[in-house]
Structures are given as C-alpha cells and as structure tokens.
Image (tube, helix red, strand yellow):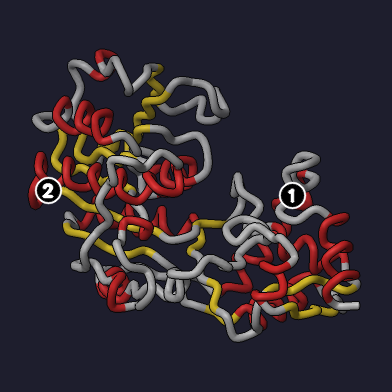
Amino acid sequence: MRVLILGGTRFLGRAIADAALGRGDTVTLFNRGVSNPGLYPGVETITGDRTSDLSGLDGQAWDAVIDVAGYDPRVVRLSAEALAGRTGRYVFVSTVSVYADQNTTAAQLEDAPVARLRPVATSLEETYGPNKALCEQVVRGVYGDRALIGRPGLITGPHDPTDRVPYWPRRIARGGRVLAPGDPADLVQFIDVRDLAAFLADACHAGTAGVFNLTGTPVPFGIFIDLCKTAAYSDAEPVWIPTERLVAAGVNRGMGIPLWVGEPGYDAYNDVDSSRAVAAGLVCRPVIDTIRDTLSWDLARGGPAPGKEGLAAAEEDRLLRELAG
C-alpha cells in the first residue's frame, strides 16, 4: 500500500510512519522539513507548505492519505480536494474536543452534536474543537464513504511533546510527598500513540470508514498514581488536595496541574466511549506498559527543557505548604 502522511516527523505523525513502515507500506511524507529533518532517510520526503502550495505532490497517487494535524478548514480543504482523484482513502485525525457537550459519556458518542464556531471566539480553547469539527465536515463532504475520521482524546507515549502524562511517572520516581490533585476516584484517560497509530494504519488496509472515538480505558487517578509507583519502584506519598482548594489557591483550572480537570462542564472529558473503535480493531496496551515506556524515554532525554515541566517543583512545594501543611 502507498501511504501519504501530511506531517510525519513529530509525535503522532512519527508513530503513524513507523506503523505504516512496519506493515510494509511505501510511505511518502509531506511537510515543511522543520521538525526532525532527516528522521527517515530511506523514506520519500517532499518539502512543502500545505497552507499554500501542494504542487510538490503533483503527478503521484496514493492508496491512502493520513492528515495528522489539520486544524484550519480552509487548509484541509486544499489538501482534501487536491488529492481527491489521487487517493482511495482520506484519514483525518480530529479530536474528542469536537463535542458540543462534554458533561456526559452519551454526549460524546460519535453521532452526538459537535461544537459550532462562535463569531466572537478568539482563543485556541474556544476555536480548537469547532475548527476541527469544520475540518471533519470538509473531509466527509469531499470523500463520503472513503473518509475515516479518528477522534483521539489525550495522546501520550514516547516522544510526547507535552508534559501532561510524562510528568507523573517522572515526578513519582523522584519520590517524597507528591501533590495529587482532586480526588483519587477522578478519572484520567489517554491513548498510547503507538496504539492509535496502529489502528489508523490497520484501518487503511481494511478499508475502514466512518467516525471513531480513539481513547484508552478510563482509570481512576489514584490507580494511575499507584501504577506510576509500581513502574518506577517508588515509595512516593501522594497528598490529595481537593479541586476547590486548588482553585481557591489560584491554580489554573485548565493547565495548572497535568491531567487535572478543574474546569466545570467537563465532567465526562476523561470518560469517552471508544467501543465502536474497539469493535473495528482498536487494541490498547496495558496502562502500566505505556507508563514504563514513557518514563524510560523521558529519563533518556533528560526530562523536558527547563521551564517546560508540567508542574514546577517550587510551585508544587508552595501548594503543599499552603494547602496540606
């Protein structure tokens, strides 16, 4: 199978390229050549800017196109329409953030209403989900039953560019008292990037179409921390601080503490149902395997760059002193 990946050298794109190559596919990468240039010396790489010029793709055809990071509906339309006659399938990576309501699991099933872009919306938080929904609409409009829309939740694993999940096994490995936000029963949910990539690569071969939530099994935060302790052979002591106290102390509700959801209206954000994808072949590895592999990669790279960690040690110390005594 010939596969074109729009992107392919960062996180998810890299995992998809690995998955496709591992299935014997002939892979072409189309990107700006900025992130990890030369990562795949044996793979055809076409340098170009998808926002304005796709001419580098002229004269070629592929069995499947995988669009890893489309966000602007106008830009996605450029590639969708330009390649419509030269590919059998278009795979668009969207997000569970497209849902209009994230208070219940039922509101986040694949056929549930999606968010609409408000004229006054300006921040990424306000526009991300609605714009992704518009991109989905473009792809489905052009490709119909030749389109596959994947809606992942939080993605992690080796090479995760965020510090949302990697923070926890690294912090637990350090030991001592660890600020644990909210309640041990609060859910966390993520999918290993390699499992997500495997599903998309297999779906191309199987001719799978439609819309699929792609999330891992929800895990209580307390169990997640216990798994981090097991993976790191750590005797760390979690200190649970309720959400209302964290908010009162000025912690940012959205990104103040990795994996913590302090924003109202997101009661089921970490409880998304992926049973449709499971029935179509999604297989997720045990959470502890993802934790171990992510910790190994994170320690090998030396952790995130200074100032990029999920919760700075000084801020954690302050919160523990003020809120836990």
Is residue 30 toward the left or the right of residue 276 in the image? Answer: right
Choose mark 2 or mark 1, whichever is in front.
1
What residue is at 51 percent from the left and 65 percent from the top? 190
- 284 relative to 136 in the view: left or right: right
Three-letter amino acid code of the residue under disc 1? Glu
Task: Verify CB contact (< 8 Å) between mark 2 and mark 1.
Answer: no
Which is nearer the N-term, disc 2 or disc 1?
2
Q: List the single residue furthest toward the bottom.
A: 185
On the image, numbered disc 1 is attached to which residue? 309
Question: What residue is shown at x 67% (from left), y 82% (from top)?
Answer: 222
* Residue 134 figure quarter: top left
Depth check, front residue: 267 or 44: 267
Q: Residues within 10 Å of mark 1 (few under 14, many from 20)?
A: some
Q: Which residue is mark 2?
A: 146
Depicted 61 relative to depicted 96: above or below: above
Tell me: 136 left or right of 18. Answer: left
